[in-house]
Image: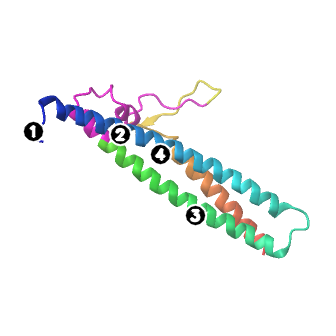
Amino acid sequence: MLNQKPGAVHDDLRAAYAAIADYHTSLVQTRFTIVGLFLAANGFLAIGFFQSGASALARIALPVIAIVLTVICWVLEVRTYHLLENLAGRGLELEKLLGYREDQGFFSLIAYQPIGPRLIPMRFRLPVIKGDPILSHTIGISLIYIIIGLFWSVMLFLGA
């Protein structure tokens, strides 16, 4: 760093900020891709489970496979969520170092949502508590894993 020009440090910060923002965006896309593939896999397993004439082995094995798949995807979701939190924290730090106002940066907008989500098609907006909306992608994705995991647990119990 001693041999760098004065603007080089600022350029390095901007490059780091861009890389973090790109990685954040990539993780968000990956997160939703995993959920989509998870739902498709569960549809495939449900077809086999509810097929007439399914063997006793299939009625036990398919729910077990689905539960294992649910746990794996949920663990991926937990890890991705923590990565997103860490990237957002570092992005906020870089925004301060770069001199961005609080309403200018990508990560500032993500961290502080001034307007709550609107329940479509109504005009009613849910409240924002301490800058966080009541509904979030994390809650929605978690509900998908919980509900499908419970469904397959019940099917395992009933199918056994």
Q: Is residue 61 magenta?
A: no
Q: Is residue 117 above or below residue 145?
A: above
| In front of the other: 10 or 139 | 10
Q: Is residue 43 above or below residue 7?
A: below
| In front of the other: 76 or 119 | 76
The residue labelled by disc 1 is: 3
Range shown magenta = 91-119
Q: Are circles 3 and 2 on residues that touch, CB within 8 Å?
A: no
Mark 1 or 3, closer to the camera? 1
Disc 4 from disc 3: Cα separation: 19 Å
SS type, badge 2: helix
Where residue 148 sits, quadrant-wise, is: bottom right
In the rendering, at what x and y percent does residue 90 appear?
30, 43
Label whose residue precedes the other's in the sequence (4 or 3): 4
Disc 3 from disc 2: Cα separation: 30 Å
Q: Tag 2: Cα neighbours inside 10 Å, few (<14), some, or many (≥20)?
A: few
Disc 1 from disc 3: Cα separation: 50 Å
SS type, badge 3: helix
